[in-house]
Image: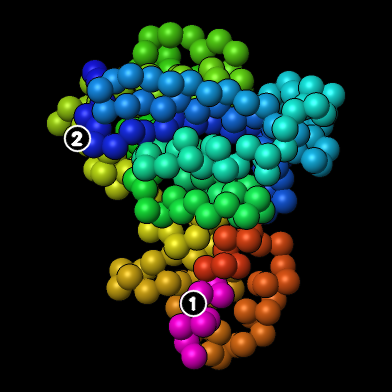
Amino acid sequence: MQLNLKNPIVFFDIESTGLNVASDRIVEICAVKVMPNGDEEIKTRRINPTIPISAEAQAVHGISNEDVKDCPTFREIAKSLAKWMEGCDFAGYNSIKFDIPLLAEEFLRAGVDFDFRKRHLVDVQNIFHKMEQRTLSAAYKFYCQKDLENAHSAEADTLATYEILKGQLDRYPDTLENDVKMLAEFSTKTKLVDYAGRIALNAEEVPVFNFGKHKGKPVEEVFTSEPSYYSWMMNGDFTLDTKKVITEIKLKMR
């Protein structure tokens, strides 16, 4: 099934130095841009993260520090990548929880203003978990009847994710609409304000904390009753995007 697209959609996957969105960096990114007419453009790029790749991460994706030492840094490709992705919606596997926040953080570090919140974000893993509850390799086998070769290579995972979404549309025609806006809404578990999921919207559309001792409490209420909590977050190991979001909320309180 061909996707019914109003805008181009970018399927992408990231391999990184580790799993900490706030401090780890991208070492490889693959993106498949699918146009409304069905045309596809694939870009795969290895990146010098400027920090060491953890042994645990290397064991998963097989990319070493030596492999990327002569590659461009993210800052060097950020503007061209943002221009290529301009006007696109986005899709990935576990992308809302990891890939989108990490890519957003890299753009912020590079000084490039790229706002994913203006785009539809489809998370194929969330659709899969709502429907079947399995892993990427199992999802590929289940929906596409194929074995996933070279799992944890960015390009293999990206292309598999694209195929899986089309397979999901074929398998659940009564539940899933071939529309990116609907797919984005269906694959989003919680309305998040920041990419890392530290701040969410409650039923009244009020920003609330989504972690820790104040989970579920309105951000403004906490910052009013406990002003030091804002300082603690700004000095803590939170993403630049999260700090930007809570600062915007705090400024509106004045």
The residue that mark 2 highlights is 177
Residue 196: which quarter of the image?
bottom right
Given residues 146 and 33, the one toward you in this image is 33
Say which of marks 2 and 1 sits in front.
1
Decide if residue 170 is on the left or right side of residue 198. Answer: left
Given residues 74 and 178, the one toward you in this image is 74
Is 238 located above or below residue 17 in the figure? below
Closer to the N terminus: mark 2 or mark 1? 2
Give the magenta part as a residue range.
246-254
Q: Position of residue 76 (x, y in %)?
A: 68, 39
* Residue depicted at x 42% and y 32%: 10
Which colour assignment does the render follow? rainbow
Number of numbered callouts drawn:
2
Q: Is residue 242 magenta?
A: no
Q: Is residue 249 magenta?
A: yes
Is 160 located above or below residue 134 in the figure? above
Given residues 129 and 115, the one toward you in this image is 115
Label 1 CA crowd tier, 10 Å (few <14, some 14–19, many 20+): some
Q: Identify which amino acid the numbered label 2 is placed on.
A: Glu
Q: Are marks 2 and 1 in contact (CB under 8 Å)?
A: no
* Residue depicted at x 41% and y 27%: 33
The residue that mark 1 highlights is 249
Q: Position of residue 4 (x, y in %)?
A: 22, 29
Q: Is residue 93 visible?
A: no
Q: Identify which amino acid the numbered label 1 is placed on.
A: Ile
Label 2 CA crowd tier, 10 Å (few <14, some 14–19, many 20+): some
* Residue depicted at x 29% and y 47%: 185
Q: Which mark is residue 109?
A: none
- State the predominant SS element of the stretch in magenta: helix
Label 1: which secondary element: helix
Is 62 located above or below residue 119 in the figure? above
